[in-house]
Every structure is written in C-alpha cells, then in structure tokens.
Image: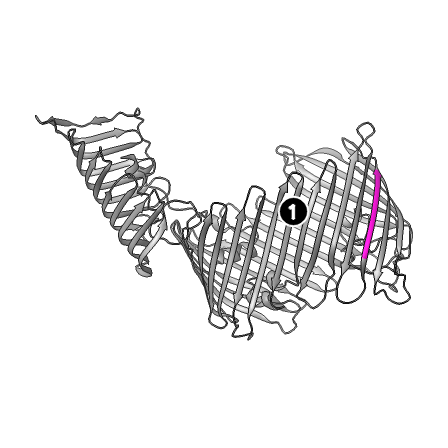
C-alpha cells in the first residue's frame, strides 16, 4: 500500500518541461489533513480498528464504522472494510482516505490485493504532503509495484475555490522503474482558456534530469520582431548534458543553438554554439561560439580555457539581451596550465582577443609566469620573487618579447592595534623588439629599486547614544613609496594604461597597470578611516574613509612620450562613506575632489531601501567630469499582496537620453504569477544616433509546473538590485 500511495506523486504529470529541477517560489499552503503525522507501526505488522466487526464461516471479516488499518508508513480509513485473508483481498468503501509520508488519497471505493500488491481506487482526489499539488482521477489502477494507470486525471497547485490553472489528461501511465510517465490527450488550461494540447507526451516522475522539452519563451522587439525560443534538454549521461534550442525571429529567421556541459572527477566545462543562416536583416550568416573549461588533470596541476568567437562586430548588439552584453568590445581567448608547489607556482599561457571595436589587441604567444614566496619562521622576514616572460604579437606596430624579474624582501610586523611593513624590491625588465620606431632602442631594459613602508593603527573607544551602546574606531594609515625616475620612452605600451585614481590607488606601488611603465615616486599616502559599530551585536552602522597623497617631487614618467609631467604637490582628495541610516535605509557615497581648481572629478551617491514586505527602492547618481553623468532608479513595490510595480530608469544626463528603461506590473498569487514589462535600451553607448531596441516581455509562471513566455524574472534580477524572482 505504501508503494501504491508514493507512486501517485503527480507533481510532474503531463509537463514536458520538467527536465531539470528548479527552485520554485512560495506556493499555496498545504491542507491541514496532509500534515497529520502517521502512527508508527512495527515492521511487518498490521493494526485494524473499527466500531463493529463480523467474521463469516469462510473467514471473511466485515468491519464497519470508523475503520482504520495501519501498516508501516501508511494508513487507511473508511466507513466499511471487507477483508478476505484467503485471497488476501481488501475492499474499502465510504469516505476512503489513504495516507503515507508523501500523499493523501481520498476516494469512494478501494480494491487492494495484498499478495500481488495491486489494486484500484475509484473517484480519487489526492493532496501531496510535500507541496500543494493536488488533483483528481476517475480511477487509479495499480498493475504492480512499478506500473500505474490514471484515468481522466488532473493536477494543480491552486487552492480549492481558486483554481486558476489545471492540467488534464484522459489517460496517464506511470513507470517508476524507468522513471518515466506518458499521457494521452493532455490539456493545460489557464482561467478556463486552453494554453497547450498534445495527443501524447512523455515526462519524468522525479526531479532527476530527464530528456525532454523545456519551457518555451517569447517576446516581441523592433529589431527581431516576434521572438520565439523552444529549448530541448538532452540528458546524455550522468556527467554531461546539452540543451538544444530553436529560436524563431520573424524579422531575421531561425537560429539554432546548443549549450553543452560536462563534468569529470578532474575538470568541468561548458560550450555554446549559435548559428543563424542568412539573417534577413544583415543578409549574411551569423555565428557565435564560446568554450570555458577549468580543472586539475594531475596533482598540483591545473588548467583553464576561455575562448569566444562571433561572426561579426554587431552580433551582441543584435542578439544580446542587455546593455552590458550589447556593449561588449572584445572576446577573450585564453589557454593556460599551472603547476603549484610549496610556496611557488609556474603558469604557462597563450592568450588573445577578438576585437569588436576595430582596435587590435596584442596576443600573448606565449606567456610564462613564475612566483615564489616564503616567510622565515625565526625572524618573520618575507622574501619572494615574481617573474614573467611574454611574447607580444599582432599584425601591425611594434611587437616583441618582455622579460621581467622582481625579487622582494619585507618584514611584516603585525600586533594588536597596528601593523608596520617595510618592503624593498628591485624590478628588472628587458625588451627584445621588432618593428621598433626608428630612432628608438630595439632592446631597452630598465632596473628600478622600489621601497615602501606601510603603517596602520586601530584605536577604539566606547560610546553611548540614546541608551544604545556603540563602539567607534579611528584607523589612520600611512604609506610611503620611493621609486627613482628612469626614462622609459623607448618602451612601447603592450598591456599598460593608467589606473583610475581612488582609495585603493593610495596604496599601490605603481600608478600604471601592466609592466611597460613604472612610475617614479617619492610620496606619502595618508588615509583615515572611522567605523561605528553597535556594541551589542557588532553590526557596522557607519564607515568613512578620507585620503590623499603628498608628493615630494614631480612625476616625470608619463604614459606617452611628450606628455606633460605631473608637478602637483598633492593628489586629489578621495572619500568614501557607507551608512546604515535606519532599519530599512542604507546609503553610500564616493567623492574625488581636485583642490587646485576646486572641481569634483568623480562622485557617486546611492540610497537603498528594502523592508520586510518586499519593497525595494534603489537610487544612484554617478558622475565623472570627463564623460559621465548618470542617474539610476529601480524599484519593486508591492501595491497589495498580489500586485506589484517594477521598473528601472537608467539615464545619461550628459547625453540627455535613456540608456535603459523598463516598467511593468507583476501579479503574484500562491499558485501562479504574471509579469508584463515594456523595455527600451540603447544597444551601443558609443553610437551618437541613439541606436536602440524596444520590446514587450510577458512571462506566465504556473508555480510547481513551469514558465511560459520570456525570462522577465532574469531581467528584473539584473536591473533591480536586491530583487530575486524566487522570493515573490
């Protein structure tokens, strides 16, 4: 009997999309009857109780009035039960209720053969104990322990009296041994309107990965027209699978895609392939491929692969679904292997890029990196070396090899309340160049000593505010850096640029990224941080940092030859602030201010609101004097338990145009939800004519079953900080 009940879990009944298990949002409450605990019965025993019992001369027992039959892990209740021990046959009638750990079944009549473990239940209604799934069947037939049939069955997760959607089928066969089910004449109805029909369908009986169709998605946009995507999941093996996708775009044609994943004991990876033959808009074939893999094929050995390719520079603009993907300017191509020993590592790498902006990048063919570091246990001295050999190559301009060696020695002194770290290193770099600019050296080298001294303190004091115990810290930090000046105009720029100035730049050894420039320095960085904590639980309420650099000489090393030297005696001021304003409000701010001309170089401000009722509001302002001034507003705002407003406005004040805007409504109940969003976003922020795309996105989610429509939930999670579609 226990197996009979357990195998009637119809959560996945008639739904072809259940190939991969997914987390579902909060569903409707399970009926109280389904939560009642089972009475524990010793293994192999059967307990029977009734108001009245009569036994015939043939041994047949008739039990009447509040009949209960208890076996290990299951129970049966009925108004009447006839039990024939000779045939091991039981017949129950009158408000029959069967229950085990997984499901509660109610029906008019039950026939059960205990010897063959087979039977049938008439006019059955079932309620799952583990989730709110429930439904009906005219008849449930048990053939044996692994085969069952249901006639005229239905399934829903909606509560009684509010059935928004229902799944129906004329006949269902369940094969638990194969973990598969089949259904005939299957209908999915929503608000009484048929949404889906199939004369035959196969579906999984558990959350195990199964080959089959996944939920389709659709949308409509200006560029692609009607956009319909139908994915098919292929469970190739326990350690690999693939999703095959057909995507029809009425303005462009039909695109085929494959997403392949694999996993072994030593590595994991995935690959994507997309192909659109003869794009009706572009007039050419469109293709994309990517492959990522990482793992360790032997002890101490690891490797990584990252490869991307698209057929043309506009691919992400036409087929990307966000501003960030549409603004992709290059695709990385990298393969590396790494060996790690005790305190050292050696990495070999080849890498390059596919440029989507027209600017050719340097390939590294190859690159070798060696790092070593140890701490002397007796003195605490830290000594190490970083080194590199790389061959830079591209079709135009200067190419060549770079070899670098950077040994260092430091003595970290760390105690409660302070740290002091003196460090000394010598950075040697040599180049062997081809196609060097006439008049410049083809084999330049550079040797520079680098000295730094890092000192920081932490002071604490208790405070009291409105009877709230507080703890305040004061954390001054000084960082002195000395690097002598050496002319580096003969050295080309392979992988070097100027860091953006900020808090972290105060404590870097080099104001340039990469190795082609080492900035001269005789400077002192000063920073002061103060934090405010609650004394009772340690939560941080406030953090403020302020800093600048004092320069004791001009900085003569520039990124490009001929650029003006920097002769300011101090840097710009940088400040950061983070505060917990109230229980629901958080704030953060950043500022970079130039005292010489009293101008703000960079600034940002963010306010975030989130309460226990699910309300989310994000406000942000970002500005950079040279080229950026933007506002970003996003929100998720429940109007009542069912209706919520969603939206985002990402706007460029400098260009006077919206970079991304969407707005819509979300209707949410315990068994279904609907999201409708209108969206507009700029496809490329560098295009002055505001090339953009507009679309309408609709997603219907039947909770406990699947989704139909576009992935609106993914858009909201990306665009609204703090939003998670599985929470609402």
* Residue range highlighted in magenta: 401-409
- Would you say 701 lies left or right of 321 here? left
Please say whether residue 593 is visible from this viewpoint.
Answer: yes
Q: Does the magenta stretch include residue 277?
A: no
Tag 1 secondary structure: strand
Q: Quadrant of the N terminus?
A: top left
Report the predominant secondary structure element of the magenta stretch. Answer: strand
Residue 74 point in image, percent of width and height: 29, 32
**Number of numbered discs on residues:** 1
Q: In this view, does 706 lie above or below 148?
A: below
Q: Relative to 686, is 639 on the left or the right?
A: left
Q: In terms of image quadrants, where is residue 454?
A: top right
Query: Which colour assignment does the render follow?
Result: one colour
Residue at the left extreme, as displayed: 57
Q: Residue at x 31, y 25 (%)?
A: 43
Whether 407 is among the magenta residues is yes
Task: Please indicate whether residue 574 sits to the left or right of residue 312 in the image.
Answer: right
Q: Name the foreground residue: 29 vs 713.
A: 713
Kindly identify which residue carries mark 1. Answer: 303
- Which residue lies at the image location 40% right of the left edge and 46% below the top edge? 27
Instruction: Decide if residue 596 is in sight here.
Output: no
Residue 131, horizontal then vertical, whole percent? 37, 43
Q: Where 657 falls versus 610 (above or below)? A: below
């Amino acid at each position: 009997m226990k197996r009979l009940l357990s195998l009637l879990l119809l959560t996945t009944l008639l739904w072809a999309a259940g190939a991969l298990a997914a987390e579902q949002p909060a569903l409707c409450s399970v009926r109280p009857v389904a939560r009642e605990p089972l009475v524990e019965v010793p293994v192999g025993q059967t307990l029977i109780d009734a108001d009245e019992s009569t036994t015939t001369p043939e041994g047949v027992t008739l039990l009447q009035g509040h009949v209960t039959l208890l076996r290990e892990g299951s129970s049966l209740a009925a108004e009447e039960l006839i039990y024939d021990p000779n045939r091991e046959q039981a017949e129950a009638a009158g408000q029959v209720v069967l229950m085990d750990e997984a499901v509660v079944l109610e029906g008019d009549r039950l026939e059960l053969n205990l010897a063959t473990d087979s039977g049938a239940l008439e006019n059955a209604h079932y309620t799952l104990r583990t989730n709110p799934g429930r439904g009906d069947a005219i008849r449930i037939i048990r053939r044996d322990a692994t085969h069952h049939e249901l006639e005229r069955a239905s399934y829903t997760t909606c509560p009684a009296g509010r059935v928004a959607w229902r799944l129906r089928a004329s006949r269902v066969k369940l094969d638990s041994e194969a973990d598969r089910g089949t259904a005939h004449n299957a209908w999915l109805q929503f608000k009484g309107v048929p949404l889906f029909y199939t004369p035959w369908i196969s579906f999984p009986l558990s959350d195990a990965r199964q080959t089959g169709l996944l939920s389709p998605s659709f949308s409509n946009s200006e560029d692609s027209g009607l956009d319909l995507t139908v994915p098919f999941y292929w469970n190739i093996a326990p350690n690999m699978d693939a999703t095959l996708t057909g995507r029809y775009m009425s303005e462009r044609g039909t695109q085929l895609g494959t997403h392949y994943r694999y996993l072994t004991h030593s590595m994991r990876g995935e690959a994507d392939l997309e192909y659109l033959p003869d794009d009706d808009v572009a007039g050419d074939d469109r293709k994309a491929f990517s492959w990522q893999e990482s793992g360790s094929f032997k002890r101490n050995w690891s490797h990584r692969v990252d490869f991307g390719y698209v057929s043309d520079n506009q691919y992400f603009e036409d087929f990307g679904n966000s501003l960030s993907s549409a603004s992709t300017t290059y695709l990385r191509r990298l393969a590396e292997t790494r060996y790690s020993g005790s305190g050292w590592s050696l990495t070999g790498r080849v890498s390059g890029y596919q440029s989507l902006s027209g600017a050719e990048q340097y390939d590294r063919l190859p690159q070798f990196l060696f790092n070593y570091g140890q701490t002397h246990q007796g003195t605490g001295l830290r000594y190490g070396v970083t080194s590199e050999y790389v061959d830079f190559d591209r079709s135009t301009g200067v190419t060549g090899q770079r070899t670098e060696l950077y040994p260092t020695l430091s003595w970290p002194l760390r105690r409660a309340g302070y740290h002091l770290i003196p460090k000394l290193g010598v950075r040697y770099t040599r180049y062997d160049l081809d196609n060097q600019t006439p008049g410049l050296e083809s084999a330049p080298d550079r040797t520079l000593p680098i000295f730094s001294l890092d000192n920081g303190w932490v002071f604490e004091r208790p405070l009291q505010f409105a009877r709230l115990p507080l703890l305040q810290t004061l954390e001054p930090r000084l960082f002195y850096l000395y690097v002598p000046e050496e002319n580096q105009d003969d050295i080309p720029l392979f992988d070097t640029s100027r860091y953006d100035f900020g808090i972290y730049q105060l404590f870097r050894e080099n104001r340039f990224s990469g190795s082609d420039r080492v900035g001269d320095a005789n400077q002192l960085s000063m920073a002061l941080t103060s934090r405010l904590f609650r004394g009772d639980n340690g939560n941080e309420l406030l953090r403020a940092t302020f800093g600048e650099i004092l320069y004791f000489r001009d900085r003569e090393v520039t990124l490009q030859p001929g650029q003006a030297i920097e002769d300011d005696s101090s840097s710009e001021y940088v400040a950061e602030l983070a505060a917990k304003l109230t229980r629901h409000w958080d704030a953060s701010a950043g500022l970079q201010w130039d005292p010489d001309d009293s101008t703000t170089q960079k600034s940002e401000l963010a306010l975030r609101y989130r309460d226990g009722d699910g309300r989310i509001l994000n406000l942000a302002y970002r500005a950079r004097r040279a080229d950026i001034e933007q506002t970003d507003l996003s929100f998720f705002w429940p109007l009542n338990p069912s209706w919520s407003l969603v939206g985002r406005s990402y706007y460029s004040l400098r260009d006077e145009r919206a970079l991304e805007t969407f707005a819509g409504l979300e209707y949410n109940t315990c068994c279904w939800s609907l999201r409708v969003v209108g969206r507009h976003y700029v496809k490329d922020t560098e295009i002055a004519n505001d090339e953009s795309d507009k679309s309408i996105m609709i997603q219907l989610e039947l909770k406990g079953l699947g989704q139909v429509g576009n992935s609106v939930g993914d858009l909201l999670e990306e665009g609204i900080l703090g939003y998670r579609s599985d929470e609402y």
